[in-house]
Amino acid sequence: MRGVRFFRSIQIKLIMMVLLLILIAVQLIGVYFISTMKTSLINTFSSTLDSQANMLTTVLSTSNANSEGSLPTGAEVNLSALVSNFLTYSGAEVQVLDAGGKVLATSSNHQSYIGRKNTSLLVSRALQGVRNNEEEIIDESNVRNKVIAKPIFSGDKIVGAVYIVASMSELYRTMEDINRIFVSATLIALGLTAVLGVLLAGTITSPIKALTRQAGAVAEGRFDERVPVFGKDEIGQLSIAFNEMTDRLSDALALNEEEKEKLASILSNMSDGVLATDEVGGVIVTNRRARAMLGLQEPRDGITLSQALGIEREPIAETLQGNESSMLLHRETEESTEDEIYRVTLTPIRRRDKGVVGAIAVLQDVTEAEMLEQSRREFVANVSHELRTPLTTIKSYAEALSEGALNEPPLADRFVGVIRSETERMIRLVTDLLHLSRFDSRRNQLLRQNVDLLEMLEEVVDRFSFQLRQKAITVSVKVEETRKTAMLDRDGIDQVLDNLVSNAIKYTLDGGSIDITATTNGDGQLAIAIKDTGIGIPKKDLPRIFERFYRVDKARSRNMGGTGLGLSIAREIVRAHGGSMTIDSESNVGTVVTVQLPIVPEGSESA
């Protein structure tokens, strides 16, 4: 594998490419050169041999022709000496033939050839008058020879022929030497090219290797390194561009991380729950509020949005198809008897090139809003009911008076008394509503003053002395020695205490008792407690006892003249003081209402 990776190196590829180009070029030049050289040598060899053959035939035809038109015999002219001295090529064999093809003389040591007939095809053609007769043959010793046969003329008559056989071994040996020199030169050239290729390729691959290392560093998140710039060429410009790209990428990633942290912080601290899904509805992101709302742990593999919300899959499927939707989700809680209500808004996540790739579910806690809406509806219904009853009574008695009851004094007086009573009841209702309206709009101003607690509590008891005597109820008032006075809005606290004492008297049976105490609790607050021995309040009604128009016994409360707003007004007054009210009650045992007020130092607020 290392060898394979080695040959995949761009440096090796460049070197191999240069070597192959040089090798191909040298081979092409070599083939052309050697081929041309070989052709030239062969042509020169053949031309020289042909010239010498022509010269020999000319000499023989002009100097040695006899009068009878035939070549002389050996006794007349020493043809062998002529032939041997004439030919310059060593190792060449020259034969002089007569018109019948018989060897008259030879330059070789084979004198036995004399007198024999040469049956070569070239000789036959030469004796027939063909002048250009040559060929290359390979003899028994595997030596390539050049063969030429030339006719000898005496006038127009062919009197014989010259037959020459010359070895070409020296020529081919020369070609082999040339080939050997060429191969050596090629190898030397390739070696030098390889060395130069390594050096030159290094100048190209070194910056590329540096770019590769920097790219790996960038991929690993290290943006502090830089690619060295070796020049102003293309690779240098690429290095400069890569360094600029690294800087921009670093800035972009830093900005992306910052935006990601902002988004994560926003999601984590949102008051609404957020869940994000992939394209198949699997939950991939949840924020802390969503997990608290739905009772989820960290997102786990396999949970779907429908499972997390506890709803059917159809709304999720429609959202993943690109449709937005909204619904209300009711969830039971262990801490409260009331269901929590969440508004779930489903929105698809779209990507330009892929369409819908997921969905986002936003959960809004609308429990309080729904409860306020329900309270508003109940409030309107209760006000309508509370006003309709006395108005109906007033209308019926007024009609009775107009129809003749006015002429009967006893009956008229009773009807007028009922009308006056119902009118006062409506006035009390409207007055209580105005009080609540002031508290709701924060327009009720407190006028604090230094109040003697014992005096204030005794005056409350005095105001209800007639009712107390009627029901034979005993009252005790105790004030802590260390807490004689407090900075309070006297009118407001009087209204609170009047409401609480009035309720205690209403729901305490004849002969019961009421204890009123003022102490300092463990938190350093003033605690005024009204304890009675009345019928008490059922446990199921205690959480709603401060709701407007809420009555435990509706018929009895209305008959006693209550509007159902007293405790609500009392709590608002106490809240305006920065305090709180608690009720502890047990059926048929009694009720304890505790008003806790912060102690304001004297002089901190003007009276």
Image (spheres, grey):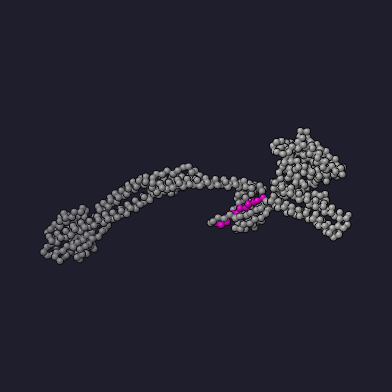
Q: Give whichever of 365, 125 is nearer the camera.
A: 365
- Residue 205 appears in the picture as rendered: no
Residue, x 75% and y 46% (percent of image)?
Answer: 569
- Residue 458 appears in the picture as rendered: yes
Q: Residue 465 sits in which quadrant? A: top right
Q: How many marks?
A: 0
Q: Residue 571 sits in which quadrant? A: top right
Q: Quarter of the image containing the C terminus?
A: top right
Left or right of residue 519, residue 111 in this image: left
Residue, x 76% and y 48% (percent of image)?
Answer: 432
Q: Give whichever of 386, 317 is nearer the camera.
A: 386
Relative vertical location of residue 339 with respect to residue 157 in this rendering, above or below: above
Magenta highlight on residue 556: no
Left or right of residue 428, residue 324 in this image: left
* Image spot of residue 305 (x, y percent): 63, 53
Left or right of residue 392, residue 246 in this image: left
**Residue farthest along the top direction in this orientation:** 482
* Image spot of residue 8 (x, y percent): 43, 49
Magenta highlight on residue 359: yes
Q: Which residues are magenta?
A: 354-365
* Image spot of residue 471 (x, y percent): 86, 44
Magenta stretch: dominant secondary structure: strand
Residue, x 72% and y 37% (percent of image)?
Answer: 599
Q: Give whichever of 419, 159 is nearer the camera.
A: 419
* Image spot of residue 23 (x, y percent): 34, 51
